[in-house]
Image (tube, rainbow, N blue to C red):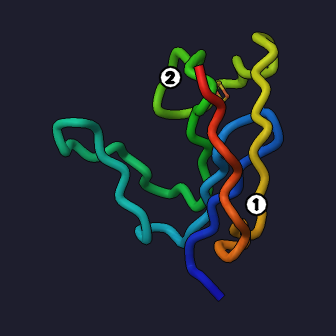
């Protein structure tokens, strides 16, 4: 079983669960966020959090919708669909 679990919450954040110290989360400059004592946290994917990269619950007030789901890869043997001409 994997040590790190990342769950795409329905119409919400990415929920990250891992043993303490198993994950390093850094900003664009490589500076680490303090995750001391945390074994779970949520990362904003709606863009509305004022506490990025963490979720602050704003997604539920702005009507964020995420339609993705884990699906099997499309059968590569299937013929390609013709492209629409313009
Ligand atoms: S996903 Fe929760 S505030 Fe963006």
Label 1 to label 2, Cα distance in Å? 28 Å
* Quadrant assignment for the C terminus: top right
| Relative to 62, residue 73 above or below | below
Residue 42 position in % (x across, y down): 62, 43
Specify the farthest residue to the top. 62
Residue 70 position in % (x across, y down): 76, 60
Specify the farthest residue to the front. 85
* Numbered disc in front, either 1 or 2: 1
Which residue occupies 82% across, 41% down? 10
Q: Nearer the viewer, residue 21 or 43?
A: 43
Q: Earlier in the sequence, mark 1 or mark 2?
A: 2
Specify the farthest residue to the bottom. 1
Residue 46: quarter of image = top right
**Is residue 48 rendered to the left or right of residue 37?**
right
Q: Which residue carries the number 2 mark?
A: 51
Which residue occupies 66% across, 50% down? 15
Q: Nearer the viewer, residue 55 or 36?
A: 55
**Is residue 9 rendered to the left or right of residue 27?**
right
Query: Dot 1 surroundings within 10 Å: few (below 14), some, or many (20 or more)?
Result: few
Residue 58 position in % (x across, y down): 70, 17
| Tag 2 secondary structure | loop
Residue 1 position in % (x across, y down): 66, 88
Q: Nearer the viewer, residue 73 or 81?
A: 81
Which residue occupies 70% across, 56% down? 7
| Tag 1 secondary structure | loop
**Is residue 29 rendered to the left or right of residue 54?**
left
Q: Which mark is residue 10?
A: none
Tag 1 near tag 2, CB within 8 Å: no
Which residue occupies 76% across, 21% down? 64
Q: Is mark 2 within 8 Å of ligand 1?
A: no
Q: Which residue carries the number 1 mark?
A: 70
Ligand 1 is in which quadrant of the figure? top right
């Amino acid at each position: 079983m994997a040590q790190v679990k990342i769950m795409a919450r329905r119409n919400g954040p990415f929920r990250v669960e891992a043993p303490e110290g198993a994950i390093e989360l850094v900003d664009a400059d490589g500076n680490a966020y303090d995750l001391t004592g945390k074994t779970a946290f949520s990362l904003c994917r709606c863009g509305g959090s004022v506490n990025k990269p963490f979720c602050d619950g704003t997604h539920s007030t702005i009507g964020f919708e995420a339609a993705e789901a884990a699906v099997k890869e499309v059968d590569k043997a299937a013929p390609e669909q013709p492209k629409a001409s313009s």
